[in-house]
Amino acid sequence: MKINFSQFFSDFKPGLLAGIFFLFLLITWTPVEASSSHNVRGYARFTSLGTSTFMSLNCLDDAGGGRFPFNFPIHFSIATCSISDHGVNISSNGNFSGAAWSYLHGDIDFETSTSSPIDTPDSGAFRANCPKDPLDNSTYCTAAAGCSACLVRNASGTPGTIYGYARVADLATSTVPAEKNGWIKLSGLSVHTIDSLGSPAYLAGSFSGVVSAVNTPASIGGISFNCLDDGTCGTENHLNWKSYIWAIWVGEMSAPNWPYSSACNSGALNSSLKWQITSGKQKKWQVAVSDVNLANPDDASFKSGENFGEASSFVCGGSNNCLLNYGDSYYWWLKLWYSINDSDPESAWLSTPWIQFNHSPSGMGRIVYGESGDDWSFKTYLHEFPLVVVQAPSTTPVIGTSTDFFAYASYYQPSTPTTYYDCDPGNCLYTWSSTDNLAIFSPKESYLSATKVIFQRPVGTTVTVRVTDPSNYFCEKTTGSIDANFSMPLWKEVKVKKDAIQ
């Protein structure tokens, strides 16, 4: 769904109430965000149309159209991509597709129809520069493929050059010579694969260049794809006026993500560092861990090797314990390698800078288990978790009668995190439960290691004991399946006296 606001507001004047109601529907309705798969992000600025006129290249950066061409005295909360679901993509073969969007000009297409191909003003001559299939030397960018623009990357990936055209959809049928049927000539723009200008580390490539007004329709004028090209970075947040490729993006990182059950079974001094890729394809990865927040993670006390593949987690444990200590705070970083084309040799792979875990509300971090702080990534557990053994009865329980269960446990202390001490009354809490939800425990929870159970279910019952230590760490153990018997009825013959009947 794409809305041309210039047309909308010309129709808005005669029907104020209807227009407000329609706008309310646009704001509250949220469609599927299809553009999240497009890898071109950011904005390009119309340099001759004022400081707040822009072309949005992906609705994920552009909630509700970004900026309205008017100011309301109230604040509207508009869901991302709900007003204009748009986005531009560059495929691995260099072909552009999708559409940008402007509230002044509507759709700006970076492709043409595949069912009714429309050729570009130079009759497709730009395609001679586009990438070619190595098998038959044919150009990927063809009119039949709907390709009106392409990106050519050199062998090292820095920089690349854009060739071809985009098209203002509303002007596509224009016969006015000055409007050039809506075509915007993109040829000459460059793309640098690694942004070194202080942008977030996940930016994999930044556009550079200005489209001259002579290469656009008369109503468009010049277009800056990077604020550094027109000097606006001094007064504007440069990401607002910057176009870039989001070739690979880590949508979320988490740590330690090590549940109590894992700490009980595999040891507490482990952390599971996880990440989720939401764009691009990971070829290789590396993790760095340090107890100091480093400017250069290459100096971290622990770095994993460079590992091939699409793994999304790394466990600090066993031989890869990341040099962790109990109860300490740590920072962690991730570096990823990716390629422009799947067939690219390793020598042509590109790497992101080190991406640091960030658990701010707007960041990518997520603490699942354990502790976190404002200025560090995760904190290890203070010590090992309780050791627990539960003893099932040696005889078969009888329904309705009392059966004894015992547990044996040890615990650890922060001062001696790997030395165990026997649980004595007062330092370990025992909590009992059963799959027989009608079972009666006496006691159900206490600092005593024994309990008595009266079962109500005869078959396939288990009993679980949870032992909680003074640090509130706990482990559980469960018995095997237990079958209970019904007791034989107790009775005796009673003769009724004759006189009692009368």
Image (tube, rainbow, N blue to C red):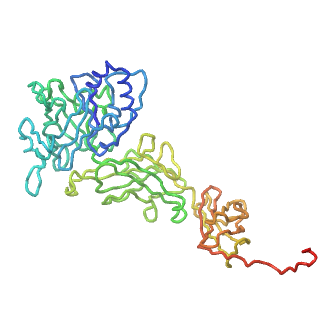
**Residue visible at 69% across and 71% down?**
405
Residue 234: x and y in percent read 30, 26
Disc count in the image?
Answer: 0
**Residue visible at 71% across and 60% down?**
446
Residue 77: x and y in percent read 42, 31
Quadrant in which the N terminus appears: top left
The image quarter containing residue 471 is: bottom right
Task: From the viewer's perspective, tell me whether residue 187 is left or right of residue 243.
Answer: left
Pick the front one: 182 or 330: 182
The image quarter containing residue 191 is: top left
Q: Is residue 416 above or below residue 246?
A: below
Pick the front one: 381 or 483: 483
Residue 196: x and y in percent read 28, 40
Task: From the viewer's perspective, tell me whether residue 75 is left or right of residue 259.
Answer: left
**Can you name the residue that lies furthest to the right here?**
499
**Can you name the residue that lies furthest to the top here?**
14
Quadrant in which the C terminus appears: bottom right
Pick the front one: 378 or 398: 398
Residue 130: x and y in percent read 11, 45
Task: From the viewer's perspective, tell me whether residue 284 is left or right of residue 150.
Answer: right
The image quarter containing residue 493 is: bottom right
Pick the front one: 278 or 489: 489
Q: Is residue 11 above or below residue 125?
A: above
